[in-house]
Amino acid sequence: MATQLPHEKGFHISWDQIHRDSRALAWRLDGRGPDNGAWKAIVAVTRGGMAPAMIVARELDIRLVDTISIKSYDHQTQGEAQVLSKPDEGMVGDGTGILVIDDLVDSGKTLEVIRKMYPKAHFATVYAKPKGEPMVDTFITGVSQDTWIFFPWDMALQYVEPYRGTT
């Protein structure tokens, strides 16, 4: 059997699927905030966490949404995480009552950086890989470490060869 490239074991997510899974994440988080079950705010990890954060904010009626921008990938290669921008310290504090939302936890390096900044925040992702699971408090779907997730904002509709080649 030929060696697979990282993108060949792909998990393709549609807009409908990310919407359903993000709503499921909201339902799982509902009533779990420290303020009588409510959350103070959401911090979305840009760029992937923005779509799930928007859906969770709508479902849980959270009006205060901000972003933290961390760059750790260059296309499909992960490197050292760099904080490019972050929310106002007065709003986030130590993270108490804050939901930090991302689309995926992979190695956990990005969330590890954020967790050091906001140790009392609640970290939630839609998808989680085994290496990153210890960095996240709540997630919806686990996927294997060697699976590459294709999100709808990275895709275009086109023909794809079958996984095992042609018959």
Image (cartoon, rainbow, N blue to C red):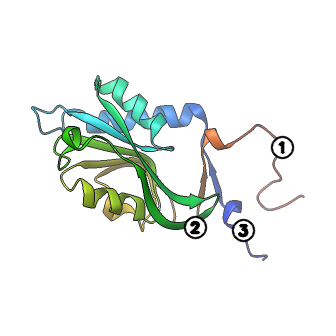
Label 2 SS: loop
On-image quarter of the C terminus: bottom right
Q: Is residue 76 above or below residue 37?
A: below
Q: Position of residue 138 (x, y in %)?
A: 31, 49
Viewer-side residue, 150 vs 113: 113
Q: CA distance from mark 1 to mark 3?
A: 18 Å
Question: Which residue lies most toward the left here?
Answer: 36
Residue visible at 71% across and 61% down in the picture? 8
Amino acid type indicated by mark 3:
Leu
Residue pointed to by mark 3: 5
Residue pointed to by mark 1: 159
Q: How many other residues sit within 10 Å of disc 3, few (<14), some (14-19) or many (≥20)?
A: few
Label 1 SS: loop
Amino acid type indicated by mark 1:
Tyr
Amino acid type indicated by mark 2:
Asp
Question: Which residue lies most toward the right here?
Answer: 167
Viewer-side residue, 118 vs 147: 118
Residue pointed to by mark 2: 146
Residue visible at 72% across and 68% down in the picture? 5
- N-term mark: 3 or 2: 3
Q: CA distance from mark 3 to mark 2?
A: 10 Å
On-image quarter of the N terminus: bottom right
Image quadrant where residue 9 sits = bottom right
Mark 2 and mark 1 residues within 8 Å of each other at the beta carbon = no
Residue visible at 47% across and 44% down in the picture? 46
Label 3 SS: loop
- N-term mark: 2 or 1: 2
Q: Which mark is residue 75?
A: none
